Amino acid sequence: HSSKSFLITPSLASSMYLMVMYFITGAYQEVYKMVDSCVSEDLTPEESQIFNQLEFLGNDNHPDAHACRLKLSAVTVGLGDNSAMKCPWSVFEELREYVKKYDYVSSACRLTTEEEKLLLKMCTPSFGYRLPTELINRDAYVS
């Protein structure tokens, strides 16, 4: 912008790149704010390459990092399993860690009740398998 007081990302690729850079530097609140603007049904090769960099950020165990990954999972779930934006982490594991660390997640990165319900539905266990107690309790709390 000409005032040099804020950043404008003119393309999806630039938005995704900025989001990845914010993730790398630990600016989770900025990542969380950008997630909604970094989603598309079709990705160019450049956008796909940037999105694939998120795979290497899966070992960040900060409470807000779990929230950001879950937010991205929630906004991309409607794109389907064959989408180029299929998140490379386990929603089940991320949600479990998010719930365990919930008290330490910053208010700016907390998921909405609707997002939590959606993510809990994505973690529905297969026959003969049961959700861990912390997820059962969280489901009861948000319902």
Image: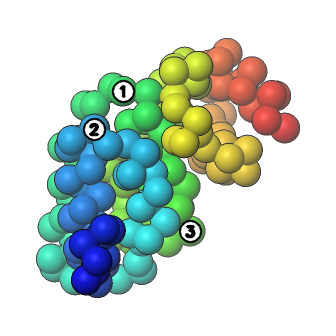
Residue 41 position, x and y percent, is 42, 80
Name above or below for residue 33 compared with residue 141: below
Q: Is residue 81 above or below residue 56?
A: below
Tell me which numbered mark, 2 or 1, is placed earlier along the sequence.
2
Image position of 110 (left or right of 39): right
Q: Residue 114 at what x, y percent from top left?
A: 73, 51
Quarter containing the N terminus: bottom left
Residue 84, image x and y in percent? 32, 71
Q: Secondary structure at mark 3?
A: helix
The image's mark for residue 62 is 1
Secondary structure at badge 1 equals loop
**Residue at 29% in and 58% down:** 19
Name the residue carrying label 3. Answer: 78
How far separated are the C-alphas under marks 2 and 1? Answer: 9 Å
Q: Amino acid at mark 2?
A: Gly
Label 3 vs 1, first from the N-terminus? 1
Distance between the alpha carbons at the discs numbered 3 and 1: 26 Å
Which-is-in-front pick, marks 2 and 1?
Answer: 2
Q: Residues within 10 Å of mark 2 (few under 14, many from 20)?
A: some
Q: How is the image coloured?
A: rainbow
Q: Nearer the viewer, residue 47 or 63?
A: 63
- Which residue occupies 68% across, 47% down? 112
Which residue, given by chain and number where applicable, does mark 2 sit on? 26
Would residue 9 be seen by someone viewing this image from the given angle? no
Label pair 2/1, CB-CB below 8 angstroms: yes
